[in-house]
Image (spheres, helix red, strand yellow):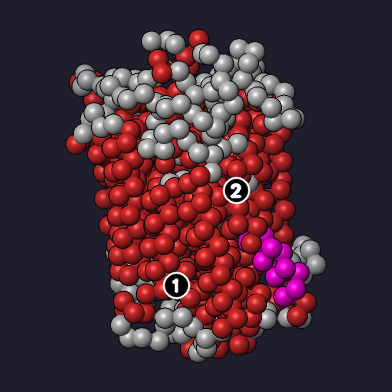
Amino acid sequence: MTHLDPVAITIVIASFLIVTLIGFASARWRPAEDPMHLNEWGLGGRGFGTFVSWFLLGGDIYTAYTFIAVPALVYAAGAAGFYALSYTIMVFPIVFIFAPRLWSVSRVRGYVSPGEFVRGRHGSQGLGLAVALTGILATMPYIALQLVGIESVLTVLGVGSTSGNAFVRDLPLIIAFAVVAAYTYLAGLRAPALIAFVKDILIYLVVIVAILYIPGKLGGWGHIFNTSAVHLKKVNPATGKPYGNLVVMPAGEWAYATLALGSALALFVYPHATTGVFASKRRDVIRRNAAMLPAYSLVLGLIALFGYMARAVPAVNADVKAAGGNAQLSVPLLFAHMFPSWFAGIADSAFIIGALVPAAVMSIAAANLFTRTIYKELFKPYATPAQETRVARLASLLMKVGALGFAIELNKTFSINLQLLGGIWILQTFPAIVIGLYTRWFHRIALIVGWAVGMAYGTFEAYRTPGGGQAHFGSSTAPVFGHTTYIAIIALILNLAVAALLTVIFRRIGLQDGYDETRPADYVADPVAPPAAGAKPRTRTPAYSAAPVAPPSPPQHPQHRRY
Amino acid sequence: MAQHAPSGKSPATWGVVTVLLAVAIAGTLCVPIYARYMPKLGAFPFFYWFQLIWVPVAAILCWISYLLLRTKKPTRSGGPRHGGGGAWR
């Protein structure tokens, strides 16, 4: 169904090489005095201002999910896929409220991952471990989603899809991923932060050109919406129901709202999102970006509309059908059919780089979690910063291998389910992290049990939900009291209910609670320069090495010397 | 969502910020508000143009909240912001 397009492939390879050069060169960007420190490798020196953070967070949050999975869902099922826009609208007010507190306490205490915060706040190694394991587990399908996105683009380019051998077929993907793994290993968060500039500029360029050019060529928006409306009314032979609707029907409103809310709450506790937050230089950077990042949400909304545009191109429909109804090819196919090869090549490059940047950040975030919460807590309490960094580098490689496994194992028809499955898991850490930012009312053991119940229920419910032609893990919504609801939300409510009930019981019987190593002032602190060495947390190595990116700092901040 | 007043801002300011952000979230969380075809804007059903317009609306609400909670004037030059003993906000 696709033929090799030499022009487009040349452009994709060229842009990949440029990005690779940037990735390796980024190790010298804002060079650190001591690069072998997790604050450097894992958080880019914790010195990104509004401008860099905007690109990094944007490059990090808007992934192959945005470019491939969401329009694929819109292409196939119509309005239901637009929950993603609703979700990205909601997420920034939520970030605005919670993220500054998490940033402050992590800055003061030198935390590089949410797992450490939870351990310190609730005085519970077990809870920190639970959060770290969940973060790693939930990040894998999210990285896998990036791989599926890259695969879709490569398929449309005609690369590697002809062989029956899985290894040969996926070889371009494996090579690309190995290269990314190499520069991530070397440069840490600096690599995706710098590449994010290329990614975002390409994406904005491609989306603006496409949104101005394609509708005119297809006979206007009226025609685009009408074509989809006609398709969506047709009955899907697999389910016996229409494919979808152009506007969410009353029966679908609850699913739409819970998917959007659940995804928005989940995003903030995803390790890669918190990594982007921790890497900011100042508290204000986060709030300012919460108001400026929605520019990307607008782009996401427009990209979602690509799904309808693709439906209005008969050649795209024919090719999707020929590929066994793989809707994820719809956007790459749209560009292949609507644009000359060279511009299709630019668009494909944008989508591929757009998937590589978040994949890199996610693997770094998971590596930070593993290093500080698992390796250091359980195996090597007195690890030096250099040892930590070495472990984190290796962990980032392992994460990528694990994600490959996920990408091969799970249903790819709707890769969006990969992200939604991750969302179910990660949302179960919400009580320990976000509620923990405000109160320690919940007992630490109650939080652990609540988390376990939420995880077990969410996984079981997702497992037994058929869909997309497979018996298990087919969908992320399940009916509750007659309303189709995102499983993550039900699991979270269950989680909270169990935790609250047990907290009351544990307090009644006087079960001892953990020691809170944070102080109320930590949550509103805004240290402009890195904290002085005196502010190191209990039994930890100094939170900071000298921070080379900050302007020459005043000799000290007496406010931090509270210990 | 319970908000404390950590930055020395008055409870009234926090109240306003809470309302602004709640409006930003509610506008897209309450699906029945916009799950309809009419009125159309050009060829766009209400469902689509409302959500696309709500993106900048929510962004502006966040920006106003940011301005309300900000305690220091931003330095235009991007020069060093430490100094002055104002390490806390």
Q: Would residue A418 be found to the left or right of residue A347 on screen?
A: left
Question: Is disc 1 surrounded by few (<14), some (14 to 19) or many (20+) residues within 10 Å?
Answer: many
Q: Is residue A441 among what the camera can see?
A: no
Q: Would residue A246 be found to the left or right of residue A43 on screen?
A: right
Indicate yes or no whether the magenta region holds residue A210: yes
Q: Total label count? A: 2
Q: Nearer the viewer, residue A481 or A11?
A: A11
Q: Nearer the viewer, residue A478 or B8?
A: B8
Distance of label 2 from label 1 (alpha carbons): 24 Å
**Residue at x 50%, y 39% (from the top left corner):** A31
* Residue A190 sits above or below residue A475 on the image: above
Indicate yes or no whether the magenta region holds residue A39: no
Q: Nearer the viewer, residue A487 or B35?
A: A487
**Residue at x 50%, y 10% (from the top left corner):** A558
SS for dot 1? helix
Q: Would residue A527 be found to the left or right of residue A221 on screen?
A: left
The percent coordinates of residue A55 (x first, y second) are 60, 48
Q: Quadrant of residue A398?
A: bottom left
Which of the image's four quarters has the C terminus of chain A? top left
Label 1: chain letter:
A
**Residue at x 53%, y 55% (from the top left corner):** A22
* Residue highlighted by disc 1: A151
Principal secondary structure, stretch drawn in magenta: helix
* Residue highlighted by disc 2: A55
* Residue A113 sits above or below residue A224 on the image: above
**Residue at x 47%, y 54% (from the top left corner):** A24
The percent coordinates of residue A75 (x first, y second) are 57, 74
The magenta stretch is A203-215
Q: Quadrant of residue A519?
A: top left
